[in-house]
Image (cartoon, rainbow, N blue to C red):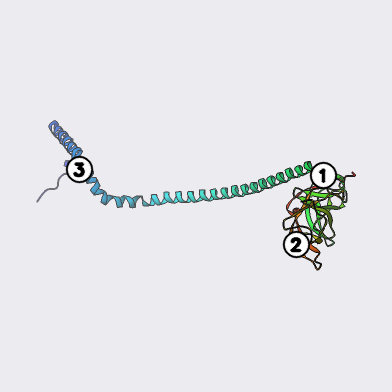
Amino acid sequence: MAQKSSRSNLKLFHRGAFSLSSFYLLFIVSLIIMGVDFRHQFLKKIKSEISILTSPVAYLINLPTNIFNNSKIIFATQTSLTEKIKTLEQTNYSLSIQIQENELIKSENKILRNTLKIRRDFRIKGVIAEIILPTVKNGYSIITINKGLKHNIKDGSAVINNTGLVGQITNTFANFSEVRPITAEAYAVPAIMSNGRENVILYGNGNGELEIPLFPASSSIKINDTFMTSGVDDLYPKGLNIGKVTEINRTKSPKFNFIVITPFSQPATFSQITIVNKKND
């Protein structure tokens, strides 16, 4: 019957003398193995073959960490993109407002330049004002402007803008005045054709146009012919644009035609106007 080894005889590490020749032998063998591996790349091939088995294990081990890191990146990216979108929307909104403001300034500058040119060409003296509100009062179209008695505005003064004749001051108050446009009913203005041959009176029809109820059929007139102020009443400077012919209709009398004129000036779309001082002022 075999005897059990005594616990005192069991040794984990051998502490005896180590042969130097064994060390040299192991060292030489190691160099030989390293040289052979370096030349033939055995270790690399072994690692490549083993990686087929170890890769899924490594992937599964690293999967929770990778999912966590990717989730952080995704949420951070979404938050960043959301903030960028909000910033871009605010920037776009601000830029759109600036564009509108710039377009308005450009439009007003163009109107002012044209107004100054008209005043210089016709030697007009007057007060520049702005239209506050177009409306209807007692059945008549009325334009309200932001200048009145305090600015030396008087009833009966002519009103023009950069496209031509607008109307006439009908009522003045301390800080504002009312203008009757040239297309209002009961409005009349002496006019002449651009060719200088026909002197007529143009009447507003209340529908945004002017009329010549009885124009001689023998006189030459065609669509797009223009009319301007004749200056015979000493109220309107001579040569201001009024409108162009858009309709030529027959009347019951073969001697006359009914002429419709569309005005060049559209007060509702131009805010800048000039009140012309009367010549006797």
Residue 76 placement (x, y as % from top left): 48, 49
Q: Position of residue 11 (x, y in %)?
A: 19, 40
Disc 1 to disc 2: CB gap under 8 Å: no
Q: What residue lies at 81% left-to-right and 63% top-to-bottom?
A: 256
Q: Foreground residue, 246 or 133?
A: 246
Q: Which residue is mark 2?
A: 248
Q: Please report whichever mark, 1 or 2, sits nearer to the chain's N-terminal start.
A: 1
Which one is in front in this view, the residue at disc 2 or the one at disc 3?
A: 2
| Alpha carbons under labels 3 and 1: distance apart | 101 Å
Q: Amino acid at mark 2?
A: Ile
Q: CA distance from mark 2 to mark 3?
A: 105 Å
Q: Amino acid at mark 3?
A: Phe
Q: Which residue is outermost to the left?
A: 1
* Amino acid of disc 1: Val
- Foreground mark, 3 or 1, reads 1
Residue carrying label 1: 127
Q: Is residue 91 left or right of residue 214?
A: left
Q: Secondary structure at mark 2?
A: strand
Q: Observer-nearest residue: 215 or 245?
A: 215
The residue beneath circle 3 is 42
User: Mark 2 or mark 3, which has the lower sequence index?
Assistant: 3
C-alpha separation, residue under disc 1 versus residue under disc 2: 37 Å
